[in-house]
Image (tube, rainbow, N blue to C red):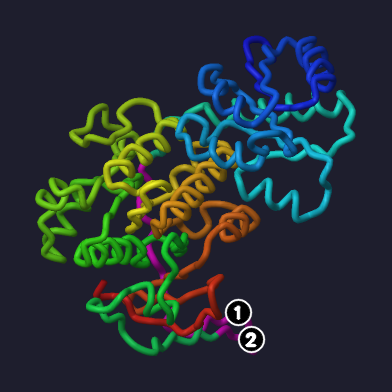
Amino acid sequence: MAEGKKIFIAEDNHHFCELYRMALGAEGYDVHFAYNGKEALEKIPAVGPDLIILDVMMPEIDGYEVCHKLRDMPKFALTPVIMLTALSTDEDRIKGYQVGADDYLTKPFSLKVLKARVASILERSDAGKVAAAPPPVQAAQPVIQATQPIVLKEEVTIAPAKAIAPVRSLNIAADALEQFFGTPIPPGSNILILGSLGTGKSFFSRLFLAQGLRQAEKCMFVCVDDDPSMVRRELSTKYGLDLSNLEGQNQVRFVDAYSWSGGRTSSEEKFAITGTLELADLSGLISDAGAELEQTDRLKKGGRRVVDSISSLFLNFELAYVQRFIAFLARSGHFAGVSTVFIVEQGICSEQTLNNIKYIMDGVLEFKNEDEKFLGRAQTMKWGIAKSEWIDATQA
């Protein structure tokens, strides 16, 4: 429904603005304008639009920079953005998507197309904001391992898969990610950890954070599928960390979205979702916690961050909304120099969606369970050639 929807358009051509006003106003939209990028950034927070349309070529600040700055604001991290431009190369489009644009219209275009794009993207955005009930707890499925060949016919058999022989065991005294990738990861990298349930992904994420805290790095743990009190207990008992002292020194922060996913109505955490989960609210909490740690693009204190996990989000929100949320975290971490680990369960989303997520990541680790061991290896990395050798990470 167009009624009540606010659209903000930043366009330096006044003639085009009048055309947009007539076309979209006739559909029932409340249309607001700015005529350069600087003015847009000043006006948008007060308007609070449901959709933002940005011309790329504008005085003061161009549309790319405006979009980038908006995506760094928690309030507008997930607000749909359409870019308008006369530039039509693939590089221009890719640049728009990299700064967080959701759609791209190349001039000249018809007003009919503009209205269709606006209606479509607002409909998808509304669908993504409808929060579902917390997912039901499902009983773990038994793991069945074949120890003998399976006979299909008298003369046809399928032998069990060949066991993986890890090349070595993970050394918990050395940097965990560096061991998998074979080289130090650049500051601000985004790493996806992929694997089925019970393959050691979460245990590895605790090690990643513990190693950062031992090196006096600023660290954040975003708890979606795990109770933050349990994470604290594991970090304290297994790695000997004094979490109370570290929190008092502004070295570590926990963001609690588990209270929502676990069906609780309250949380003792300072940064917590206690009512209906909105991804914009979660983005805001992560940004607020990051500000206390000085993990911002201005201060660039760097450090580490874990999001465990993004799997529940795919079950409860519209796909495009989840992808924008992940892209926001990836961008914010990159510009603040914070290395972020994202955890996702194998099979929770389609292969195409998974590939889209991998595209914005700097590296991907794959985990599996074999013979009661947690095995992991690097799938891809953007700063070098990934080693495909398996490492035993059981002790992590």
Find residue 388 and report its horizontal and vertical position in percent: 51, 82
Q: Is 83 situated left or right of 380 in this image?
A: right
Q: Look at 47% across and 52% down and name the residue there.
A: 335
Is-magenta flag for residue 119?
no
Q: Is 389 situated left or right of 29 in this image?
A: left
Q: Is 23 situated left or right of 268 in this image?
A: right
Q: Look at 77% across and 12% down and name the residue there.
A: 27
Can you say which quadrant of the picture contains the N terminus?
top right
Marker count (numbered): 2
Q: Which residue is mark 1?
A: 152
Local crowd at mark 1 within 10 Å, few (<14), some, or many (≥20)? Answer: few
Q: Which structural element holds mark 1?
A: loop
Find residue 267 and report its horizontal and vertical position in percent: 22, 32
Local crowd at mark 2 within 10 Å, few (<14), some, or many (≥20)? Answer: few
- Nearest the eye: 109 or 317: 109
Q: Amino acid type of disc 2? A: Val
Mark number, residue 156: 2
- Nearest the eye: 37 or 154: 37
**Figure check: 94 above or below 17:** below
Main SS, magenta region, reads loop
Q: What stretch of residues is rendered in magenta?
A: 137-158
C-alpha gap between disc 1 and disc 2: 6 Å
Evaluate whether residue 293 shows in this view. yes
Is-magenta flag for residue 152?
yes
- Nearest the eye: 353 or 184: 184
Q: Amino acid type of disc 1? A: Leu
Find residue 268 and report its horizontal and vertical position in percent: 18, 34
Q: Quadrant of residue 184?
A: bottom left
